[in-house]
Structures are given as structure tokens and as C-alpha cells.
Amino acid sequence: MEWQALEISLRLALFTSLLLLPVGIFLGRALAWKKLPASNWIQSLVFLPLVLPPTVLGYYFLVAVSGEAPFGQLWYSLFGSQLAFTFEGLLLACILANLPFAVQPLMHAFGNIDPEIRDAARVCGLNPWQALIRIELPLVWPGLLGAFLLTFTHTLGEFGVVLMVGGNLEGETRTLAIAIYDQVQAFNMQAAGQMALLLLALAFFSLLLLQWLGQLKVRRQRAGEP
Amino acid sequence: MSEHLDLRFQLKAQGDIPLDVELHCQPGELLALLGPSGSGKTTLLRSLAGLYTQVKGEIYSGDSCWQSTDSGIQLAPEKRQLGMVFQSYALFPHLTALDNLLIPLQGLPKKQATQLARQWLERVHLKGLERRKPSELSGGQRQRVALARALIARPRALLLDEPFSAVDQATRQKLRRELALLRQEIAVPTLLVTHDLEEALQLADRICVLHRGQLLQVAQPECLMQRPASPTVARLLGMQNLFTGQILGNSQEEGLRLDWQGQQLTLPFKEGFTTGQEVTWMAPPHSLIMHRPDRPVTGDRENPIKGKIEELITLGPHASLAIRPQHAPQWPLRFYVPQHFVQRQQLAQGMQVSLSLMGKGLHLFQ
């Protein structure tokens, strides 16, 4: 077992899912409720990583963060370092790649809130922030947990983007998924098997948890709650 | 504070949901906005609450301005201090009945707010159900929580959006009675959106008939029912027996004479009608008296019309009758009579009868 790779995988998955939560809340809520003029464009962009090969996403990310591109230059002038082949770069790429997994469950959850309940919150004297914290977030918590679990699990299993953007630097960007690939290449099947089993178990239990959440939601709906 | 606040507004909108309304609601007055679906009544209510902002015009509560397009004022819903009851109750599903009532009381210290919320739950007969979530309450109980939540923070206006449409008939009657009682204690200007004429008649001080965003008539319930302003209002209110005719003469001495398909009807003199004028007129149910020709009654034989019972349908304790007049068979007169009257008079389909149209009760549209 490569403990360092496991630690990087877990750290990457945790940061990705945590940082994606506010993004998912903001985008999911806006897409579910607001009649945005560019709604179709935004949705297509958000869901693009679902259908794009990770190599394409990784390629454009590398182009964007290179020293010649505006974003890469901006990053360099702010932090004095390059993004490519670093943990930060990997994190940013994973956030982009996992956008649909965070946005979709939250969009669905916000869409399930009765518009009259949103109106009632405002009429009861809550400003938009208070309404978000006291009424909306408690109502979308299964969506929040779902978004967290999906992005966490998916980031753990991320391979293509990690390889393109992070390379395979030990202690920096070498994740468990990459390590498995490396070990198989080196015919070290036993080490690969241990790590593969761990990822399998983690993914399976996350999905199981998601199923339970789904059932909980159905029960709540039967009881007349959204 | 809220005791002497009125609500005045003048709102206009174009496009999908047109609106052109000017109204003044006194403190303690209940205005019913009555109209078919799509008439703009819910849009009007949402505009007043600040939830719909595609409307131009002005809204004043007492001397504070909620909206003024000219001055660029558009107060957010949470700053308007109003109470609103929604069609689907819109209780916060994750909060208990008590916590739902605490939401509008954010400015108060927790202890005082809780005490007030408990008092209100008791006031709407929900003592003991403080810890229940909305899903554990019946429709009527949810509606009571919604009403208490709307009133607890002493709102400057109360807006009710078809508040009783989702409960059964018995509960509806009970809730209407409770609302009428609460109104006696709280002098807040109230707007009730409804498509139910009976509800408007029972609860409203004045009824505003809304059609395609326009106010067709604003009147007290009795006045509205006796003197609808136009044939459109009459039809919207489900009134029957609307006909056209020509004025033959109108004077203090002889009264107003009206030609209805060759039959002359006499009414008391009415200001504003001239000889030769084509008018639409209406025979409300209270203007019709029916006789059986074989059982003549002494008494009024005003404007007699002979006809045949074309239709006789039992509807619970009443019967719906359609009488086809001999002189104008294409214009049947429709009205209801009590079932016991049908039995006593042994009325049957096809029977010849005569009707008196009481001149005083007939209504002419200007």
C-alpha cells in the first residue's frame, strides 16, 4: 500500500468536494430557480465534463495554465509559481472535472423546493441570505450530502485528468489511481490489488450511502415534506 | 402600530400578465379580489408583497412607500412587514408549528417570541401541537398555523391567496368563521384572492371583480349581486337571464317600458335611459314569481309571461328550472326553486306555467 498516494487521493477528494459545495449551491440554485438568459449555455458547459474525454479537459487545462496563457500569467504574478504538475493545479482541474457531480444533485434539490416556500420565507421577514441559511439549506441537505459523496468518490477514482494535469510526481500529484496503474505496468499485481480493493470498497460504500439517502428522501416525500 | 394603516396602490403591467388596478383598502377592511383564473389576481397580490416586480406604479402602506416606479423605490418583500397566507400553506416543512411562528419574530428576544408564538397557537386552537411538523398536521391545522404565522408580527397588511381552496368543505366553513372572528380583533387591511363567489360574499366588505387584469367593479356584496355594473360582471358572477331589449319610453308618470321580443315589460322610472335605446337587462332570481295557470293566485300579476317548463333538474334541496316563454322560445328563463315547492305545486317537465317579472327587481345595464 502506498500510504502517501492514499493520503494525496483523500486530500484531493476532500478539498475538491468541500470547495465544490458553495459552487454547487450557487450554480444549482441559480439554474433551478432563475430564468437565466444563458441558462442552456451554462448548463451545457457545467455538464460538459460528463461527456468529454478527461484527456481533452486536461489538455485545455494545461493550455490555460501555461506561461503564455492569460490565466497562467495571472496565477504566476499572484503566487509566483506554475500550476501545471502541482497539487493546486490538480485540485483546480478536479474541481472543473467534477462540476456536474456537485451541481446536478443540488440543482435537483433546489428545484424540489416549492416556490411558495421561498416566497413565504421572504414575506416572513428573512432577507435572501437568511432565507438561504434558515430555510433553503436545511431543505436541500440530502442534495448537499449527495453532491459531497458523489464528488468525493468520483475524485478518488479520477485518472485521466490527474495523469494529464498532475503527471505522476511522488508526494505531490501521485494519487492512488495513478499508483495502481504504475504498479500494474511494473507487474506488481499484489500491490495494485490491495489499492484497487480499497478504492472499490470506498466507492461502493459511498454509493450505498447515496442509496440510503435516496430512500430517506422518498420517505420524507411520502410524509408530505419536500 | 398597525391599527391605523391603510393600503393604497395603483399598479400597471403589460405583456403576458396585463394589470391595471387602483384600490384603497381601509384598516380593518377586507377586500376580496374575485375573478377567473388568469384574471391577474394572484399577480396583483404577489406585486403587493414585492414578490413580483414586473409591475409599474405605486404602493403605499400608511405613509410609507413600498413601491414607486417614478421615484425608483422597490422595497424588498422582507421589509414590507406584511402577512401572507399561500394557497399551499407554504409552511416551512423542516420546522415545527412553533418554530414556523418564530420565523417572523426574529427581532424579539427568544423568550418573549416563544411566549407570543404559544399564545397564537392557542388562539388558533392548536394548543398542544407546538412540536408537530407540518407533515404531522391536517390541512385545516396547517392553514391555522399559516394564518397565525401571517398575523403574529402585527403586519401592516394581510394578503390571503385562495387560503381555503385546499381544505374540505366542512373545514373551509370553520376556517372562514375563525377568520371572520380574528378580523374583529385585528384592524389590518386585508386582501383576499378567491375565485369562489360564496367565499367573497361571506367574508368581504367589498368585492373587486377582476377580469384580464382590469377592475370591472368594486362594490359591497349586496350591491354587486343586485346591480352588477356590466353584462360581463354578471356573467363572471354566474348570473343568468341576461337579455337584450329596446326602451319604448321612460318617464316618472308611466315608468320605464321595455320591449322584450315583442312583449312589453314595465319597470319603475330609471334615470339615464332614453326612448329607442337598446339595452341589456337581467332578471335576477328574486324578480321572478311563478304561478300555475290552473291554480291562479291573487296578488301581483306584474309583467306576466306565459311559458312551458323546459327543464326541471333536482340539485339536492333545490330544483333548477328553465322556462321557455311562448313569445320568445329561444330565450329561456332559468332559476332555482326549493324542492318542496316543486312537490307542493306538482311541477313537471312540459307543464304550462306563467311567470311574473317584478319590475322593481329587474336590472338594466347602462
Image (cartoon, rainbow, N blue to C red):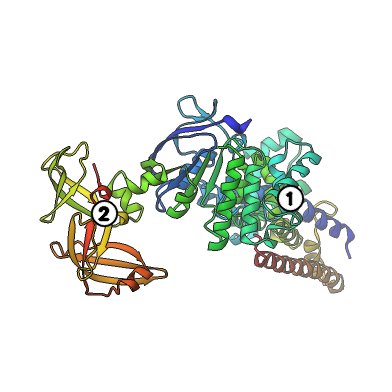
In terms of image quadrants, where is residue B108? top right
Residue occupying image coordinates x 53% and y 32%: B6
Q: Is residue B67 something one can see in this rendering?
A: yes
SS at mark 1? helix
Q: Position of residue A20 (x, y in %)?
A: 71, 50
Choose between A1 and A62: the one closer to the eye: A1
Q: Considering only vertical position in the picture, is B139 above or below B63? A: below
Q: Position of residue B257 (x, y in %)?
A: 14, 46
Chain to which mark 1 belongs: B
Residue occupying image coordinates x 67% and y 44%: A131
The answer to which of marks 2 and 1 sits earlier in the sequence is: 1
The quarter in which the N terminus of chain A is drawn is: bottom right
Residue marked by disc 2: B283
SS at mark 2? loop
Choose between B183 and A78: the one closer to the eye: B183
Residue occupying image coordinates x 76% and y 39%: A81
Identify which amino acid the numbered label 1 is placed on: Leu
Q: Are marks 2 and 1 on the same chain?
A: yes
Q: Considering only vertical position in the picture, is A7 above or below B293? A: above
Q: B178 left or right of A159?
A: left
In terms of image quadrants, where is residue B299? bottom left
Residue marked by disc 1: B98
Identify which amino acid the numbered label 2 is placed on: Ala
Q: Considering only vertical position in the picture, is B56 above or below B358? A: above
Cα gap from disc 2 to disc 1, whole angstroms: 52 Å
Chain to which mark 2 belongs: B
Q: Is residue B85 something one can see in this rendering?
A: no
